[in-house]
């Protein structure tokens, strides 16, 4: 991923999923002069933590909760309806797209083999698939490298049906007709090796308004991250790239103002409903500093990002990898931004003033997980923010720390350690019609091949499922076929008994749910369309 290679858990926030004690008077934690310290909570200063090396007793190992350990908790009551599988792996989160307009979603997914460019004997190591609601593969499109981005659904040919845009390593960006997989357009570098032209990885793209008056949305994607460079070496700059949605022509490609690399997907937002559209993007990597930037569309289209707003500046030698999340945290009518920093902090930025509202840090931890914002605790009126950190230093992690904080104040409501060190961003929705959202949080460990999925009700883990077989990206949660019952669509990835890589896609029944949609249904659920 950021330094040397794309690691398996990078886009698992592919993202992006904690427990603690704290109050509004928590001690301020200085995270650097650019970040402010209005309200900072150091998780390792809370009761039950042990300095910079917390060990609260990993849940996945079976600690006691209300007289019951994980081993006696029930499993997830989501019956499996079908599973399909194939060779290679997937680090792309499944996306539900109604490509033919019949009211039933199809499922698009990217696949590939990690480190293909570091293993030149591997060729044709990537593809995109579309599966029907019954699991049947409707089409498959081969690519020359791993498809790591979560696909974008947007109509690019004017037929009022969504098409598919998918990004991958080695400067692969393809636009595919949703119904057939036919290639509509693709990015092409002038040189045989895109690196020679300064082009690297594409991530998850977003749809822009029609900027050239042809009736078709444009496409915005970030490009950066040289996976062939060794950790600690100087990294090439990244770019924001605007493509003509109808034919793929490159309309603009401004370089990021700090000259840093990026492994972050861009997101769209408006601070107020009537404000101009803005783009958020983080720069830096695991061992390279960076910032979180906000740009206007005019700045991007005129290829001059020097006037961009640096919402969070560098405070260490680590950057911003997991995309942020949005919500009106302080209920002033303005969208605020919750930023996960790779150095182990969750920072809330006031959308009106661009100043820090609060911050929570987990020293000795790093994160690839985007936060989830939902109504998780009936005892705390309003929204809560969930985040997750992995303990260790890239690329070695041994456990994960999960917490929930009050969105308005940053007070820590829940703080717990889990044995699985890697955490894709979770999903959330009101599964039991009680007016509160439940969380589905996965953890996994590549060292042991074990994977756990936990259900949180009112900040209590009420069900846990343990499987072998490797990791998983963020699932999709919602009503796939419009029958009033929700489904959970999981993509799983790992190695079989012969150490051969595999992927699988699984549909599970969640059951009847009153809400039409989940609160947080998938990876990057907001900010990908104007």
Image (cartoon, helix red, strand yellow):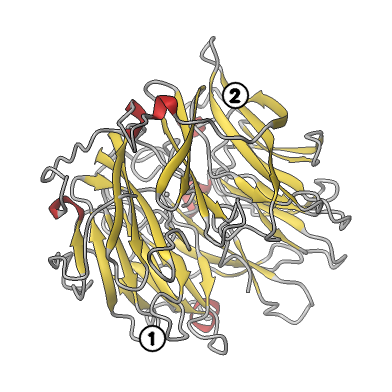
Is 455 left, or right, of 65 in this rendering? right
Can residue 203 be seen from the camera position used here? no
Residue 471 lies, with reference to residue 162, above or below; the image says above
Q: Earlier in the sequence, mark 1 or mark 2?
A: 1
The C terminus, quarter of image: bottom right
In the image, what residue occupies the spot 65% across and 41% down?
Answer: 489
Is 502 left, or right, of 306 in this rendering? right
From the top left corner, tell me how far across and down residue 315 is, in percent: 20, 62
237 or 418, which is in the foreground? 418
Label 1 to label 2, Cα distance in Å? Answer: 46 Å
In the image, what residue occupies the spot 57% across and 65% down?
Answer: 526
Q: Which element carries disc 2, helix, strand or loop?
A: strand
Residue 122 lies, with reference to residue 438, above or below; the image says above
Residue behind mark 2: 502
Can residue 519 be seen from the camera position used here? yes
* Label 1 vs label 2, nearer the camera: 1
Displayed quadrant of residue 435: bottom right
From the top left corner, tell me how far across and down residue 80 is, in percent: 69, 30
Residue behind mark 1: 352
């Amino acid at each position: 991923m950021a330094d040397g290679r794309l690691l398996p858990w990078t886009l698992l926030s592919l993202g992006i999923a904690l427990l603690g004690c704290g109050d509004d008077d928590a001690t301020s934690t200085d995270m650097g002069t650019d970040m402010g310290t209005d309200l900072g909570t150091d998780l390792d200063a809370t009761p039950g933590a042990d300095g910079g090396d917390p060990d609260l007793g990993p849940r996945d190992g079976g600690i006691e909760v209300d007289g019951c350990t994980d081993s006696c908790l029930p499993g997830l009551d989501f019956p499996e309806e079908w599973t399909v599988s194939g060779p290679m792996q997937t680090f792309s989160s499944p996306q539900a797209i109604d490509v033919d307009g019949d009211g039933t979603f199809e499922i698009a997914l990217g696949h590939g083999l990690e480190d293909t460019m570091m293993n030149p004997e591997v060729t044709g190591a990537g593809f995109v698939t579309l599966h029907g609601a019954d699991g049947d593969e409707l089409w498959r499109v081969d690519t020359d490298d791993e498809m790591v981005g979560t696909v974008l659904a947007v109509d690019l040919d004017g037929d009022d049906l969504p098409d598919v845009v998918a990004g991958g390593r080695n400067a692969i960006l393809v636009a595919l007709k949703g119904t057939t997989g036919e290639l509509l357009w693709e990015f092409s570098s002038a040189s045989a090796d895109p690196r020679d032209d300064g082009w690297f990885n594409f991530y998850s793209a977003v749809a822009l308004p029609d900027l050239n008056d042809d009736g078709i949305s444009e496409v915005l994607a970030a490009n950066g991250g040289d996976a062939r460079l060794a950790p600690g070496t100087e990294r090439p700059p990244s770019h924001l790239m605007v493509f003509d949605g109808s034919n793929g022509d490159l309309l603009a490609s401004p370089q990021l103002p700090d000259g840093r690399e990026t492994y972050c997907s861009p997101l769209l937002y408006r601070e107020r409903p009537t404000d101009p559209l803005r783009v958020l993007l983080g720069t830096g990597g695991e061992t390279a500093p960076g910032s979180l930037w906000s740009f206007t569309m005019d700045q991007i289209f005129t290829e001059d990002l020097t006037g961009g707003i640096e919402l969070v500046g560098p405070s260490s030698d680590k950057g911003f990898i997991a995309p942020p999340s949005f919500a009106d945290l302080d209920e002033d009518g303005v969208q605020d931004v919750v930023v996960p920093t790779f150095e182990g902090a969750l920072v809330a930025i006031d959308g009106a003033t661009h100043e820090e509202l609060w911050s929570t840090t987990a020293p000795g931890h790093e994160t690839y997980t985007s936060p989830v914002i939902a109504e998780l605790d009936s005892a705390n009126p309003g929204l809560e923010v969930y985040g997750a950190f992995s303990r260790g230093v890239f690329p070695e992690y041994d456990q994960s720390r999960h917490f929930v904080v009050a969105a308005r104040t940053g007070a820590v409501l829940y703080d717990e350690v889990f044995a699985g060190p890697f955490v894709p961003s979770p999903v959330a929705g009101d599964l039991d019609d009680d007016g509160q959202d439940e969380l589905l949080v996965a953890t996994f460990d590549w060292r042991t091949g074990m994977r756990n999925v936990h259900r949180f009700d009112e900040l209590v883990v009420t069900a846990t499922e343990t499987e072998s077989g490797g990791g998983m990206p963020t699932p999709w949660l919602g009503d796939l076929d419009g029958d009033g019952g929700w489904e959970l669509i999981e993509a799983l990835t790992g190695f079989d008994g012969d150490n051969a890589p595999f992927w699988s896609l699984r549909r599970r029944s969640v059951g009847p749910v009153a809400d039409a949609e989940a609160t947080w249904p998938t990876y990057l659920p907001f900010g990908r369309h104007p």
